[in-house]
Amino acid sequence: GNTVRLLKINNFLYPPFSADVIEGVPDLEIREDDIIICAYPKAGTHWVWEIARYLLAGATTGVPLAEKDNCMIEWMPASSLDNLPSPRVLNTHLLFRQLPRQVKQKRCKIIYVNRNPKDLAVSCYHHHLKLSQFYNYEGTWDDFLPLFLNGQLDYGSWFDYVKDWEKTVQDNPDVPIYVTSYEKLKQVRYVSSRHGVSWTVRVVKNPVDEITELSQFIGGSSGRCDRQFAARVEEKCSFRSMKSRKGWFDMSNEGEAIMYRKGEVGDWKNWFSVLQNEAMDGYLKQYMSDAKTKFLYDLPRPPM
Ligand code: A3P
């Protein structure tokens, strides 16, 4: 069809699976050293999750974590999450008030990830298409954008979601929340050939400072991360390296990678028509003009 099949629980929209797990989320057992990654779907949840895992594991052992497990709070049965070794990095698309009660009681560290809504909407479209056997979605991009703008998707309206997290950060200065973004973490580099023989790689925009700050927020042994290590983590968690390590849950039934598509900032320009862009800007003006978050729709381009 050209609408998305969803679950509605307590007046909130979820993907059409694991209703029993969702109902158990408030009572989930949480550990003090859990790191919780929160983001609207397709904002870069798995990327930041992997960066956090590397920061935690790598700084102590120098060796990156081997296995990728699914650590999604509202998808995985409590027993699987209970079996994960500490320190755990858990991820979720829930709002703050929907998180397990113990997250607040134990003052767990939360990393919230933003992404510009234009790239995010395009990424969401492909996500729903690739998982069409669950979402029963077979529409076009033109059919999809109105669903995104009107919040007829899992986790509801992106506009409401972002504003809700902004308010959470504002109203809870005692809760450790680090806000980062897809665009802050994206490295821009280009390779040029000199004299047709040797190759030079130039980094136009470097996320090493952001990764270093993230590591200081995570703390523990990861807080001792230096710039050199941050650069290694960036490389290990680049789109290309992560894609090459994809695990079982990264695949849809057709064997296509769900979590890795293009991995860029600005791909929206290949999808939005002028009219669609105006529609999105209209929604942003109407719903987000009081929001503090500033979104980056493009990154510096390498010189030609
Ligand atoms: P695109 O569809 O624009 O490529 P989430 O993990 O929240 O579901 O987000 C998925 C999006 O993050 C997809 O965006 C995916 O390609 C991108 N992504 C995944 N790993 C990435 C990485 N290491 N670097 C950059 N983007 C990444």
Image (spheres, rainbow, N blue to C red):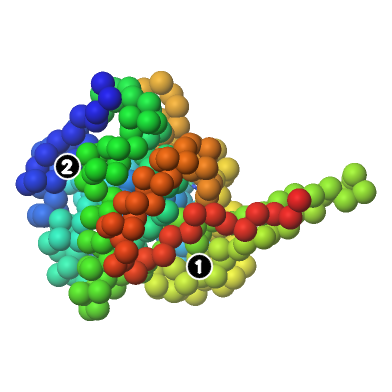
Few, some or many C-alpha atoms within 10 Å of disc 1 (few <14, some 14-19, many ≥20)?
some
Which residue lies at the image location 79% right of the left edge and 49% below the top edge?
192
Residue, disc 1? 210
120 to the left or right of 194:
left
- Whether residue 30 appears in this view of the structure is no
Type of amino acid under label 1: Glu
243 to the left or right of 139:
right
- Sequence-first tag of 2 and 1: 2
Few, some or many C-alpha atoms within 10 Å of disc 2 (few <14, some 14-19, many ≥20)?
some
Asked if residue 46 is positioned above or below residue 244 in the image, the reply reads below
Q: Which SS class for mark 1?
A: helix
Residue 228 image offset from top left, x and y in percent: 62, 67
Which residue lies at the image location 41% right of the left edge and 47% below the top edge?
278
Q: Disc 2 vs disc 1: Cβ atoms closer than 8 Å?
A: no
Which residue lies at the image location 47% right of the left edge and 72% below the top edge?
213
- Outermost residue, right direction? 195
- Outermost residue, left direction? 10
Q: Is mark 1 within 8 Å of ligand 1?
A: no
Residue 156 image offset from top left, x and y in percent: 22, 46
The alpha-carbon separation of the residues under discs 2 and 1 comes to: 32 Å
- Whether residue 219 appears in this view of the structure is yes
Q: Which SS class for mark 2?
A: strand
Residue 210 image offset from top left, x and y in percent: 50, 67
Near-viewer residue (226 or 157): 157
Answer with the quarter of the image where residue 124 lies.
top left
Q: Quadrant of the N terminus?
A: top left
Please identify, in this view, whether the residue under mark 2 or under mark 1 is nearer the observer: 2
Q: Is mark 2 within 8 Å of ligand 1?
A: no
Which residue lies at the image location 37% right of the left edge and 47% below the top edge?
280
- Whereabouts is ligand 1, in terms of quadrant? top left
Residue 292 image offset from top left, x and y in percent: 34, 69
Residue, disc 2? 13
